[in-house]
Image (tube, rainbow, N blue to C red):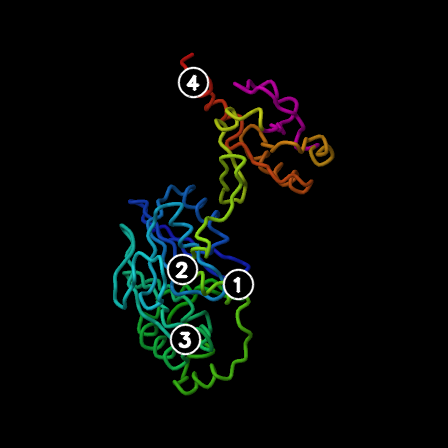
Amino acid sequence: MIFRQLYDYTSSTYTYLLADESSREALLIDPVFEQFQRDLAMLRELGLTLKLVADTHAHADHITAAWLLKQKTGCKIAISADAGAENMDIGLKHGDSFGVQGVTLEARSTPGHTNGCMSFVLADKTRVFTGDALLIRGCGRSDFQQGNASRLYHSITEQLFTLPDDCAVFPAHDYNGRTQSTIGEEKAFNARVGGEANENDFVQYMHAMQLPHPKKIDEAVPNNLRCGKPESGEMPPEPDWADLRISYAGVPEVEPIWVMQNQPSVTILDVREPEELDETMKALDNAIFIPLSELRDRVNEVPKDKPVVTLCRSGKRSALAINVLKEAGHERVANIFGGVLRWNASAVPQSITGHDS
């Protein structure tokens, strides 16, 4: 199984990718709206097809990317049937099996943080994705959004602590940089429910907590009850000056063939060194040449009247040039993916002229 743990620093949210190596089908657990480009880039670069997005509950601290990812990929959306969410495709009930080809999860109802909280257990019980029910050395709050400390205690002790001790715990959040735990660790050391704590200990602890409400709760909850669909029903704006994509490294990229077909509308910035310029470039009509080693000092020579696309031999140095341009105030910038090597491989006469050579 392919497994990745991703992190959103703003909301301290973990997103999890699970995919089958053979079928290349993938699912995402608890994706974050602002990180959808990152998640799509990872899927693309790993050669995976997103089939399912599953939210552990209707979050109060961030907006899910479920609806947005469905618009982009055609995937289905799964969330607890008790969450009361619109736009879901699969309303999960306690004990349901779900997933993608080669990856199966069991849905376990673990309410107490919210009524619709679920934990997802991998079929072989080696991993459990606990949402906000069980955190590393802690647990989700029970003081808002249908919270109930007693229900949460029973969810943790009866549904999660009955899993094997070596089952790895992957929560929806951690605010201290911790990435995973185990059921055995949490049974022994969880500061709220571990060790010899009984229901009364836990409930009194939870009632005594004095925490501010999540900053985004008024925005997040209504949106998440629509599975992340904005109230307007419209997709968020994206750059429209090019057929742009963002790499998993965070670099905006365009394919060489797009640049060939749109050369008059962009400035092509070639950042190779002078001794490299004797390498033949097919179908390149115009470019300005500023070596990367000189770009910071000469960045004012790059026009701002058009978008700028950067070029080098392989596309690596030109990706760094993007940062230099952004620091200088250029907003419409992109790297030519694969550089000269991919450019020349893409420069087929009929793809440019529309007829055979």
Mark 3 or mark 2, which is nearer to you? 2
Looking at marks 1 and 3 on the same chain, the residue that comes earlier in the sequence is marked by 3
Callout 2 amino acid: Arg
Query: Whole-Å distance between the Cαs marked 3 and 2?
Result: 18 Å
Query: Whole-Å distance between the Cαs marked 1 and 4?
Result: 54 Å
Which contiguous range is marked in magenta?
Answer: 266-294
Callout 1 amino acid: Gly
The numbered disc on residue 326 is none
Contact, mark 1 vs mark 4 (Cβ under 8 Å): no
For disc 3, the marked residue is 146
Q: Residues within 10 Å of mark 2 (few under 14, many from 20)?
A: many
Magenta stretch contains residue 217: no
Callout 3 amino acid: Gln
Q: Residue at x 35, y 52 (%)?
A: 27
Q: Position of residue 308 (x, y in %)?
A: 61, 32
Q: Position of residue 55 (x, y in %)?
A: 38, 60
For disc 1, the marked residue is 177
| Label 1: element kind | loop
Looking at marks 2 and 1 on the same chain, the residue that comes earlier in the sequence is marked by 1
Residue furthest to the top: 357
Residue 276 lies in what quarter of the image? top right
